[in-house]
Amino acid sequence: MSRVIWPLAALLAIAACSGNGPAVISSPDGTGGTTDGGTETTTIPTVLKGDLQAIAYDGTTLQVQIAGLDSTPTLVEFDRVASLDVAGYKAYKMQEDALDRMFVALAKTSDDGAVTAATVSDGGQFNRHFGGGIYSRNGSFDRPEIGDGPAEGQVSYAGDYAAVMNGRVQYGDPTSELLDPGDADPAIQPRQSSRVSGAIFLNANFSDNLVNGAIYDRVMIDENFNLDDVILVSTTIGTDGTFAGKAENPDLQEIGDYGGIFGGTDANSVAGVVYLTEVEDSFDGELEHGTFVLTKCGPDNTSSPCNHVLP
């Protein structure tokens, strides 16, 4: 079982801090390590972390603390709901009763166990929604060796993207997991997050310390509606292997933010989250919380488009 590691006592202490404090992913049994192999946590940019304070995830059980009308405990255990899985990202949900907000979370750990990311959002109720994303690394940043030849230091990553968007799914829809609201007026009924799937490709240069990429083949699963591509604009890779940058649409208009962390031997994996606004002209007020966990193109990832790049 893959685990992202942080002692539970430390996790609870962090969770008790204000919403502006660091957020981490942890295994609830406390058997693991920390970012960079020490006692420092990965600080998630506030715009990406959103309303999340902490997530505890061991690959099977997911617990969430979110400042957003979810439940009473500091960490709330979500229910596994495989019917809402997206492209290898495990789905979980939480809804206290039929007239409370329903939260959907998507989480994944890399095959090498080095990085994990998760995102969560409710579908919206009373003109507002709550959500955010978190990513973390097990161990330290292992920068790939950089030689003197052509393309040295240039690395590509590819895989699946998954997201939750403030929702258009209502009770009774084919993919709804909402509790039955009975005869309650529609004005007070919550909605379920719409799920988004896609593909994501990143190019990273560990010589120039830059990363950029795109999210494409984007589809709103529950509505079977195609969405525009998202461009992840070039941004700096920090000395700790983290990065944070801006997202644009193909027309060069800024529509959000992204960030992540490289992990594993020779930075074999990368995980991150995305926060997007106004991504589709056909809708108004859409807010998308996305996540990605990718493997480096090469022996461990020969899928398309990795078959078009140098190892």
Image (tube, helix red, strand yellow):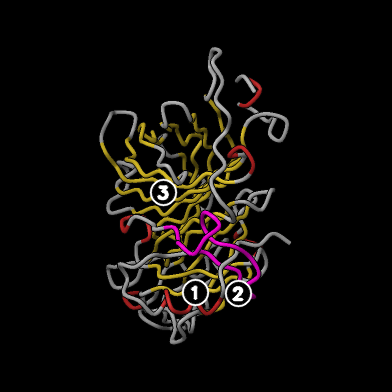
Q: Which residue is mark 3?
A: 274
Q: Which of 30/279 is in front? A: 30
Provide the residue designation for mark 2.
28
Q: Quadrant of the C terminus?
A: top right
Q: Which residues are magenta?
A: 25-42
Q: Height in image: 96 above or below 24?
A: below
Q: Please name which of the two marks, 3 or 1, marks the residue nearer to the observer.
A: 1
**In the rendered image, which quarter contains the N terminus?**
bottom right
Looking at the rendered structure, which numbered label has been put on residue 11? 1
The numbered mark, 2 or 1, whose residue comes first in the sequence reads 1
Residue type for callout 2? Pro
Give the x, y percent position of residue 116: 57, 55
Question: What's the residue type where badge 1 is placed?
Answer: Leu
How many angstroms separate mark 2 from mark 1 (CA)? 9 Å
Residue at image point 36% right, 75% down:
67
> In whole angstroms, how far apart are the C-alphas of marks 3 and 1?
23 Å
Q: Position of residue 192 (x, y in %)?
A: 46, 66
- Crowd around label 2: few <14 · some 14–19 · many ≥20 (10 Å): many
Left or right? Give the position of 210 relative to 174: left
- Pointer 1: residues within 10 angstroms few (<14), some, or many (20+)? many
Residue 62, by quadrant, is: bottom right
The answer to if 152 sits in the magenta stretch is no
Q: Amino acid at mark 3?
A: Val
